[in-house]
Structure formats: structure tokens, C-alpha cells
Amino acid sequence: MALRLAWAYLRSSPGRTLILVLCIAATLTLPIAGARFFVVLEREMLARADGTPVVIGSPGSPADLVLHALYFAPSPPGELPVSAADEVRDSGLARPVPVYARFTAGGRPIVGTTLDYFDFRNIGLDRGAQLARLGDCVLGWEAARRLGVEPGDTLASDPHDIFDLGGTFPIRLRVRGVLQRTRSPDDHAVFVDLSTAWIIAGIGHGHDDIAEIDPDAERTDQGYRSGAQVRTHTMITDENIESFHFHGDPDTFPLTALIAVPNDDRARALLLARFVSRADGLQALRPSLVVADLVEMLVPVRRALGGYSAVTAGVALALFWMIVALTLRLRRSEFETLHDLGCPRSTTAAIIACEIAMVLGLGLLIAGVVSLGGVELSRGWIRTMAA
Amino acid sequence: MFANLPAARPAVFLALAAALLLGACAERDDANGRESSGPHSVYTDAYHLHYFAERIGGDKIRAAFPAPDGLNPSRWRPGDDIIERYQNADLILRSGASYAIWTRFASLPLARTHDTSRAYADRIIVIENAITHSHGPDGMHSHDGESPYTWLDPTLAIKQARAVKTVLIGLLPESEAELRARFESLETELSDLDREIASIVGDRADAVFATSHPVYHYFVRRYGLDAVDFHWEPDEMPDAEEWAALDRLLDERSGRIMLWEDEVIPEIASALGERGVIVAVVRIIDRRPPSGDFMSIMRENADSLRNAYDTLGSR
């Protein structure tokens, strides 16, 4: 009975009821959304980190290194030689997964790696085929959608320093395939073979055969001396692929990070121990611990948001209570009529309690739907933010 | 239950067998579609490695060497479909020493690809300023850089076979004893071969004065030979200038044995015979032989060398 009368009263003044419900909803949305946002953010950050057992990299900020290895953060830390990958593999303790991510294509990070990366992350192809040779790329699902490219198309790497006139040209990549959607940073990346990434970096290149275009070229200890114009290839094709070559000691070619996948917990411990106080300064990190530290840094923000939300909620509830008190005073004659008709005071109290509960309940419901739904819908953005 | 269906029983068994077979064939272990059933697939980029893998792995593995018979595997360029087969293999064995050029440009998985020459990286011979030349349909090339034919030195072949054994044990730890036994058998044969060739050469290392092609660096080094490399093909008559170069060398050297990759055409044989040059056919076994296998051809090489030495000794 009280419930029916309370509901009838609320329906009799829809405008006032709506305002009250919206006030409650607006007040509760921020704290609920904030709390949920931090839970999701932490979970997203830790999930990627937990799935990456060990990251090895140059000396410097552990956070920079781990964030680069996990999310291909655009400003990579220092570099380490690719021989570190051989060292990890030869140790028999772990599987190395190299990462060299310095450049972009269409604003998306180009990740130079080996096929081991796809095995490690268990990412299959959505369409097309896997990297086959130098100059090939496969795109993350979202990168392919945003860039509007499909297998069979080509994609140029972005010029990395327009003021470096002697620098390398952008390379036009052959799009071989598009990866399955993973709802991770991998969706946004362009993957190439490590050697292709080194060519983009200018460590390797391909050009006309000097001996072929200028038979009179003088051969010296350093190579050929010729006045002929030699074209540098900007796309790797079946015809010119054998002209591509690298300069320098292959063992020193760079990586920006090295992911290691240990055989078991003992192997991980042994591997981490090998990278303590090394002469070359290389460090091995457990991303879950580094990211947990980063998450810890969010605690003050979370607390501040909680405090602000509590104050706002307190003020709003006080305002709500004041409105209720004023309303009750305005409705005194209405309640007295009910008492005159024989309605017990407990019933009028129950009616008022039901009205308050309904308004609060509706407000809470709207706040819950808006905040939780909003956070769920924003998961992609939160992932980006986590990155 | 099949007792009630006597007529249908064979069909049911067949269907079950087919389903099991198909199920086994279709079993996949990851998102990238590698098969987890059946013997492990081991792909190699050189014939001799294929032989080593088969000898050591036996029926525990499925060894594959997809290079077409008619092409030089070091210069062969596999299509994307073949590269995909390599990528999906459980193990990829590379000969190293810059042998298969295509592996420099192909995307291969680091964890499953093994350079079997790393055990003797310090013994790899580097050739500088080699002549660029051509023969047959392979186009222009030079032998600049690392000399790839390491397996012609049986001691290096043993090291390479040992590397194959090690990675196969990593793949099949439960079969370690069997793999070791098979390797030891191969090692014994290669060691015997090495001793045999060393005894043939003995203290007459200067008897071999030339090679038809710069592919014998490891063989020459192993047995202390002092041979000059030419760029001759057994089925292409060299021109007068090349014969003159040979004649000049013959004036300088007392040795009269020349190593060839294959039997020479009669015109070459005749011209060499006139000069007193004895042909020793030492095949480099870089592709699947029409008959026999790596070991039998290596023994034939030793026999050919012995015949050449015997002929020289009988003069």
C-alpha cells in the first residue's frame, strides 16, 4: 500500500521527481565511474604486463623500457644489440622475442620483430598471409581499418627526420596480411620483419649494382668508386631484393627491447640473475612488478578522486535531505488529512521512506548504468590511456 | 553394440578411422596454424643438413628440403608458399656460412631457426675480392664473402651434425638415447672418411694443384692442399686464355691432380689429358644426388681422389 501511494505521489509530480533523480544520479555517477575506471585501468595495465614474463633492455628508466616493450611507446629508451637475443636463446632458459620499434607508418608504430612475436602473443591472421620476406608488413586489425589498407596494398613508412637530407628514404611496404583483433596495442601496430625495420632505420639498403651500370667503376678496398648515378630502392621487390644489404657487424644491430619467455619459474629467476650488474648495463625486468609500481602511483589520484567524490556526495545528500524536509513541511496538510482518514502515522512514515528509497534507487540505477556502461564503452580508450 | 549391426561394422570402423585420421591431421596447436600431430617437421636449407637430420632423427621426424632438384639451392629463391612451409616447420636448420642466400631475405622464426655453423664460426673462410662471373642460367655471381661449402671438411661436417643432434634432442627429449646413438654412427662414418682421405693425400698434398671452381676451400684446408681455384664448368669448354692460365700454373707446379665438381665433357678431358692433368671428381653434394646419398657420394669422392693419386703414382 505504502509503495503504491509513494509511486503514485512521485508520478503526480514528474518534473520534481525527475530533477531529484537526476541530482542523485549526477552525484553518484562520478564516484562510481571513477572507481570503476581505476579498476579497469589497473586490470588492463596489469593484464598486458602479466602476459609478458621478462623484458630486457638498455640501462635507464625501467618504466620507459617496459611501456615501450608492452605498448610500443613512441619514445623508445636506448638500444641493445641483437646479440642479446642470441645470448638469451643460447642460455636455453628462455625464448627471445626481439622488438625494434622506432618508426611509424600512417602514424601507427612500426614494430620490427620476428614471427616469434605472433607465436608468443598467440595472434593469428584475420585475412591475407604472414610476413614472408624483406619489405613485407602485417597490420593490426585496428591499424588496417583506420589506414584503410588490405592485403595486396602498399603502405609507406613515415619519414622520420625531414631535416636529415642525407638520411634514409621512406620504404614502401608490401601489405601481406591483417591480424586478428586482439583488443590490445597489437591492434594498432604495423609489424615488419626485424631486417625490414633495420632497412627503414638506414642500417641496410638496396641500390643499383654499380658494376652493372658503370663497367668502368674503379674497385677499391672500400668498394667501388664511380661517378654514375646510383638509385636507392624505396620498395623491396622480387627483382631488387638481392641488392639489399646491411652495413656493419650484424651482432651489433639494434633492438629497442627484448622480450624473453622463460621455460619455467626457475629459468626466469636464473635469467633475471644473469642481467644483474652487467658490464654492458643491460637490465632484465619483470613487467608485472614495474607496472604494479606504476599502478601504485595512481593511488593518490584515486584517493583524491575518492575524497572529492565523498565531499560532493555529502553536499548533494545534504541538499537532498533539505529538499525532502521542505517537501514534507509543504505536505504537512496532506499527511494530516491521511491521519484524519484513519491512516496510522507509521503508514505515512512508510510512504515517505518509500518515496525517498525510490528516488535514491532510481538515481543509483541511472548512475550505475551510465558510469559502468560508460567505462565499458570506453575500454578501448582506457587501453590507449594505459598505453 | 556393433554386434547388432554386422553389415555396417566395417563401414563404421572405416568412418571412425577416417575421423581419427582427419582429426589428427587437423589438430592445431596455436593461432598460427602449426600442426601438433605426427612426427615433427624439420626443414633445412641445404641437402647435407637434410641428410644429417634424416640420419639422426630417423622416423621421429619428417625432414624436408624443398629446393627443386635442378636448381642451385644456395641461389634458389623460394616462393612465398614455400617460405610459409618453412615458417610452419617445428625446426628450421640453416647451413650458415652465407649458404642459402634466400634465408637472408625471408622472415623466419628466431626460436625455431638454428644456424648449425655456429659451432665453428671461427673456422669459416672469408673470400675477398672474388671475380664476378656467370655460368648456365644462374646469372652473374661471385664467390665473395663467406665460403659456404663447409661440409666438404668431414671434421666440420661432424660439428654440424652434432649441432643437428643437439637441436633434435631439444625437440625430442624423450628420444635422446636413440638420437645420440644415431649421431654416433654418423660421426664414426665421417671420422673414418676423414682418416681415409687424409691417408690418400698422405705427404703428397702438393699433388693437387688446382680446382675447377672456388668451392673446395674447406677440403683444401683440411688436407693441407695447395690448389689454385679456376672458374671452369665441367660441361663448358674454357677459352684459350683460361687454358693459357692453366698452362702457366702447370709450369710452376709439380702437382697434376685437378679437383672437379663433376665428370668433365670429353673435349675438356682430352685437353687436360694432353697436359698430363688427372681429373679427380669431388662432388660438392649441394643438392639431392640422383642416386645414393651424402655419405655414399662422399665415399665416391674419396675413391675418385684415390684413383687420381694412384694414377699419378703409377707414372
Image (tube, rainbow, N blue to C red):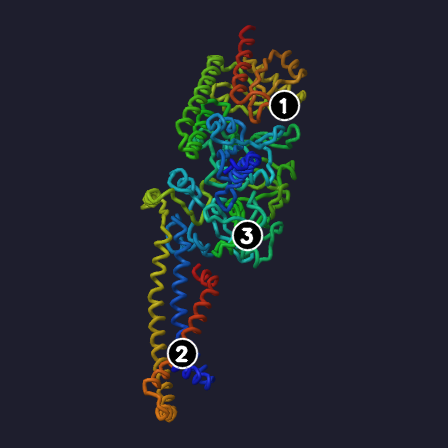
**What is the chain identity of the residue bearing mark 1?**
B
Checking the image for residue B233, the label placed there is 1
Residue drawn at x 66%, y 21% is: B235
Crowding around mark 2 (Cα neighbors within 10 Å: few <14, some 14 to 19, many 20+) is some
Q: Residue at x 45, y 71 (%)?
A: A370
Q: CA distance from mark 3 to mark 2?
A: 51 Å
Q: Residues within 10 Å of mark 3 (few under 14, many from 20)?
A: many
In this rendering, position of residue A179 left or right of residue B174: right
Chain letter for the residue marked with disc 2 in the picture = A
Secondary structure, mark 2, is helix
Q: Is residue A222 visible?
A: no
Q: Residue at x 46, y 25 (%)?
A: B156
Q: Residue furthest front?
A: B4
- Type of amino acid at the residue the image marks with label 3: Leu
Task: Compare residues A5 and A81 and report the one nearer the observer.
Answer: A5
Please state which amino acid type lies under the numbered disc 1.
Answer: Glu
Q: Is residue A252 above or below residue A287?
A: above
Residue A214, x across and y down, in percent:
65, 38
Q: Which residue is mark 3?
A: A139
